[in-house]
Image (cartoon, coloured by chain):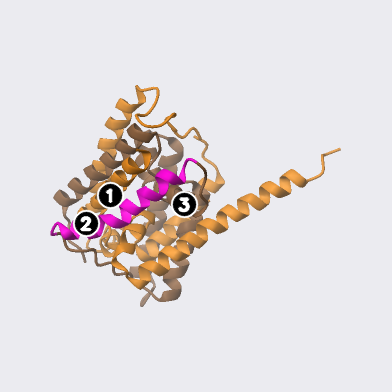
Amino acid sequence: MTEFTPISAGIGGVLIGLAVVMLMLSIGRVAGISGIAAGVLEPQRGEWTWQLPFLIGLVAAPPLMHAAGYPLPHPVMPGSTTLIAMAGLVVGFGTRLSGGCTSGHGICGAARLSSRSIVATATFMIVAMIVVALTHHVIAGMP
Amino acid sequence: MKSGVALLCGLMFGAGLMISGMTEPQKVLGFLDILGPWDPSLIVVMAAALVVTFAGFMAVRRRATPLFAATLAWPSNREVDTPLIGGAALFGIGWGLVGLCPGPAIADLSTGSSPIVLFAGAMAAGMVARNLMNRRRATTDASAPEPG
């Protein structure tokens, strides 16, 4: 059970949008996290030199914010070790197959009004909502 | 210069995820759980990010080149095909199961939480698996005999 927090959600969303625009304006690249992560896993000349620092920034943000007085994230996930590993696998495989995730398709692509990204975003949102409905309300005791 | 700006963008992106609460899988699940006590925060995050990105991209599109690199790499693929929908559906399954997508998974690595490390490791394996399959298909296609 989490509370609706529109103000912090709005501020966070604006920061994410600014980061996306700044990356395009400065080095002309799309801030799609799955694409950047996949790029670092298989480095390409001229690309990893911005992809790796971007990911380092992403990981360094919570501790830096913590130093500025914010509480650290406290990620709690439902399910067993097996389920978490399976979920990670399909997230990695699926985002590469479709060429983007919540950031690449959901923000960068949708903001360019790309039909490809809008279809992808609608698909992963609806599927995720169905999965949550099933695991939280239909199948008792799942996951 | 490229690396420094990218580091700053990553920091801003991560700070945005953290301030908005998106680094908490439970908050994401609270949004995805439309049959439960719904938390619409995620849609506010996306809407705010979309408005800023839409306006910012409109301004950047007037430029021929970015500030510190040679080309603006706007994606050109607009095709809606089976891999797009299949991949998005697979991603949706994983996202719905645990409430983590790639950005928060990587930002949350900073907490050292072992389930997060496990998820991120599995995610990396899934990405590499997809790339390997892609490459094998490319090799097979290239070595296939000429038709006729």
Q: Residues within 10 Å of mark 3 (few under 14, many from 20)?
A: some
According to the picture, the residue beneath numbered tag 3 turns out to be: A40
Q: Which chain carries label 1?
A: B
User: Which one of the lettered chains is coloured brown?
Assistant: A
According to the picture, the residue beneath numbered tag 1 turns out to be: B11
Q: Nearer the viewer, residue A105 or B18?
A: B18
The percent position of residue B135, horizontal first and vertical second, equals: 63, 50
Q: Residues within 10 Å of mark 2 (few under 14, many from 20)?
A: some
Q: Mark 2 lies on which chain?
A: A
User: Which element is circle 3 on?
Assistant: helix
Do circles 1 and 3 both sit on a common chain? no
Q: Give me the disc on residue B50.
A: none
Magenta residues (range): A46-69
> How far, Cα to Cα, is label 3 from label 2?
23 Å
User: Which one of the lettered chains is coloured orange?
Assistant: B
Q: Which of A141 and A27 is in front in this view?
A: A27
Three-letter amino acid code at the position of disc 3: Val
The answer to the question of whether label 1 and label 2 lie on touching residues, with beta carbons closer than 8 A, is yes
Q: Does the magenta stretch include residue A56?
A: yes
Residue placed at 19% from the left, 46% from the top? A10
According to the picture, the residue beneath numbered tag 2 turns out to be: A64
> How far, Cα to Cα, is label 1 from label 3?
17 Å
The quadrant holding residue B100 is: bottom left
Q: Is residue B52 magenta?
A: no
